[in-house]
Image (cartoon, grey):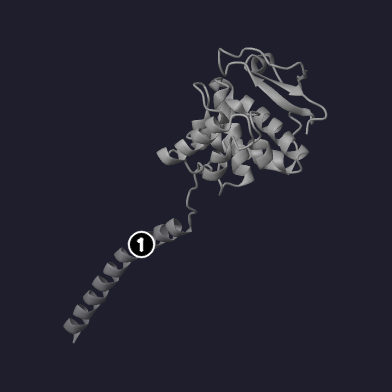
Amino acid sequence: MAARDFRFQLFVIALYSILSWGIPANAAAAKESAEATATPVAIASGTAPATALPRCIDGPHDIQKVVTSVKNNRKNDAKYNGYREVLRDASDKELIARLAYAETVGANCPELNTKIAPRIVAVIANRVRIRKGDAKSVVFERDQFSSSLNVYKESRYRDFLCPKDAELWELIMNVVDAELNQPTHLVSSTTVNYFLYKHSPRWTRAPWSHKEDTTNTTPEIRTCMRTFRVPGWK
């Protein structure tokens, strides 16, 4: 009986030892697992995902439609009907952004893009406000934004149809949003013209005598583009 009791005591001691050894490991594992579950997933800092680029229109058929329309209607208001057709599903905001994008690229001052783009958007937005929100009448007004819509060697009509710089596109979309919601007053409310001095060596001076708007500009910006007031523009 004593031997049996002794063996039983040994069994109890051994079992206790096994359980004692196992508990800390399992508890630590459970604690580690719980902490891993409770720890928030790290989210990369920075801006929200970039605004997606718009549809790229570069198919031969669409390009030919645009080019033919421009060349066959040089002196009438059907000149940009090709653009209207291939971009028939584009929103007003997208059309404004496409135009501002192409105009910015056409300025040929890439180091100043972040300073020039907002001024270009502000001028276009002024025109849209004066036209009571009729963005298409502004974007597609004949020969008003020749550097982006006419077809010639230095023209950026391909950039208007197919923006490719995602960073510049996002910047412009954000500025367009801001300007359409509330004027930023980056330029005067009557400023509806600008001239791009480095767009082409063939045109080095503005073809008008309007008063320059120097609001929020700098000598650096003025070497590339200047904005002009045109009171009474309709």
Residue 50 location in percent, x, y?
A: 52, 42
Q: Residue at x 38, y 59 (%)?
A: 28
| Residue 66, image x, y percentages | 51, 36
**Quadrant where the N terminus lies?**
bottom left
Q: Nearer the viewer, residue 54 or 73?
A: 73
Quadrant location of the C terminus?
top right
Residue 206 relative to residue 8: left or right:
right
Q: Residue 51 placed where, x, y %?
A: 54, 43
Residue at screen point 26% across, 76% down: 12
Residue 191 falls in image quadrant: top right
Q: Is residue 121 left or right of residue 189?
A: left
Q: Give SS at disc 1.
A: helix
Residue 2 shows up from this direction? yes
- The crowding category of the residue bearing disc 1, from other C-alpha atoms within 10 Å (few below 14, some 14 to 19, many at least 20), is few
Q: Which residue is depicted at the point 58% across and 16% down?
A: 198
Relative placement, left or right, of 56 versus 205 is: left
Q: In terms of image quadrants, where is residue 182?
A: top right
Residue at 50 percent across and 41 percent down: it is: 53
Q: Amino acid at mark 1?
A: Pro
Farthest residue to the left: give it. Answer: 3
The residue that label 1 is drawn on is: 24
Query: Looking at the image, how many numbered discs can be counted on the residues?
Result: 1
State the residue lying farthest toward the right: 232
Asked if residue 46 can be seen in this view, the reply is no
Q: Residue 90: x and y, percent?
A: 57, 46
Locate residue 208 relative to residue 35 in the image: left or right.
right
